Amino acid sequence: MARWPKPAEGSWTQHYPELGTAPMSYEDSISPEFFELERDAIFKRAWLNVGRIEQLPRTGSYFTKEIHAAHSSIILVRDRDGSVNAFHNICRHRGNKLVWNEFPREETSGTCRQFTCKYHGWRYGLDGSLTFVQQEGEFFDLDKDNLGLARVHCEVWSGFIFVNLAAQPRQTLREFLGPMVTGLEGYPFGELTERYSYRAEVGANWKLYLDAFQEFYHAPILHGKQTPDNFSVAAQQAGFEAPHYQLDGPHRLVSTSGVVTWELDAAMRKPMEDITRSGLFGPWDVPDLGPMPAGLNPAGCEPWGLDSFQLWPNFTILIWSGGWYLTYQYWPTSHNTHIFEGNLYFTPARTPRDRVAHEMAAVTFKEYGLQDSSTLEATQLMLESRAVTTFQLNDQEILLRHLHKVAADWVGDYQRERTEAKR
């Protein structure tokens, strides 16, 4: 699925007949049984982004990642040869969690020379090898060479660290990403290392929050109060539609045209935006990042605002024309809860004004993220009532149709394979 129609060719949905135009069911977002299938069909088989290479700056740097949907905890560590290793966070002796601090359910990070189990003191090298066993002579036929940490498939693309929990991934990471995403190669992700993070526990299915960022139909209404009244009213009357949508395999893209904040009439700006020279669209002072890759702004929007690359299953890279980017991740914890993580990346601040501008963009985006999440629990509650079971989607909500179809396809494939394996 890699057909990229131009807007002039008509509606978006008609170019993807496999998605249909009928009212859509959200049973996949309210069914505990469907979520249990997603655990194995999706989160134990897809490539999952767990962080960036800057989180492992030197030999022995590590961090852990809790992947609740797969009942997994992963250790990511920089080896002595500079490579990144990933292991299941479990000791080979009695199954204790290997790396944790005061609270075993919380993620942690740091630097070490080796990993030591808190329970009985077994030690493991940065390459996962078992290097020490307390009272080794008391064990029976102990083969330390075969008792290293359980390795997880790990690959790095453009500084993003991905893991795959399958015994044998069906595709390499690059094959999984496909041409639309790998078309971003050359974007200077590694130069944007000043990071601002936020995290929230959300009482809604993980796909519902993804849906919130897959269309801009809601923007003039839900975010209307973020702008002065005269601009908000005009926006609501005019509505909004992104000029470009694109599908490639399980991944999705939406591009929007741009607004240069400082060129807006002063009545449409907030005083704090003028003071900090920053806001929703990022800092006004745009860094020179050099030529951009061909995969950015594929529709040639002019002026261009942003591209939101939504990587299956739960990772979004949103690149702004103002020379910064952010990522979203949605980590399921049950059929109706998930953890949302947002990270904003800028070039390192050179002056106090730069730092203030970055922080202004970060807090502004946090406010917008809260607005987007504010409707989700209400949506989840009413979907679970099943008072209505199918819902109307418009043409610009094509990415929602695609997301839920891909989820159904992956679960369906898994069920068929499991049935065939039993024959």
Image (cartoon, rainbow, N blue to C red):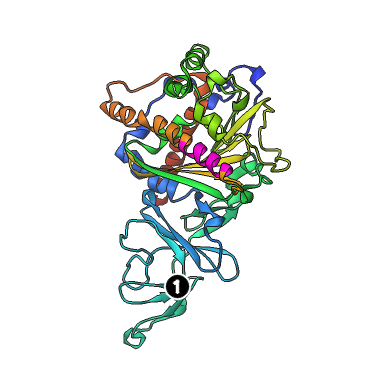
Q: Is residue 71 left or right of residue 189?
A: left
Pick whichever, 177 or 187, lies toward us: 187
The relative height of residue 403 versus residue 6 in the rendered view (above or below) is below
Task: Answer few, some or many: residues within 10 Å of disc 1's Cα (few below 14, many 20 plus, some between 14 and 19).
Answer: some
Q: Is residue 367 left or right of residue 261?
A: left
The spot of residue 419 in percent (x, y) is: 39, 46
The spot of residue 241 in percent (x, y) is: 55, 20
Where disc 1 sits, the SS reads loop
- Tell me where the magenta segment starts and ends, as one range: 353-363
Which residue type does callout 1 highlight? Gly
Judged from this view, the residue extending furthest toward the bottom is 137
Q: Specify the principal SS of the magenta part.
A: helix
Q: Is residue 378 left or right of residue 215?
A: left
The spot of residue 15 in percent (x, y) is: 59, 23
Pick whichever, 68 or 302, lies toward us: 302
The relative height of residue 64 versus residue 309 in the rendered view (above or below) is below
The relative height of residue 327 versus residue 303 in the rendered view (above or below) is below
Quarter of the figure with residue 182? top right
Quarter of the figure with residue 7? top right
In which quadrant of the rendered image does the N terminus lie? top right
Question: Residue at horizontal 37%, vertical 42%?
Answer: 200
Question: Per the image, is 147 magenta?
Answer: no
Look at mark 1 in the image and give the residue it sits on: 148
Question: Residue at horizontal 73%, vertical 41%?
Answer: 291
Judged from this view, the residue extending furthest toward the right is 291
Residue 215 visible somewhere in the drawing: no
Question: Residue at horizontal 49%, vertical 46%?
Answer: 196
The relative height of residue 110 versus residue 124 in the rendered view (above or below) is above
Question: Per the image, is 357 magenta?
Answer: yes
Residue 110 visible somewhere in the drawing: yes
The spot of residue 359 in percent (x, y) is: 50, 41
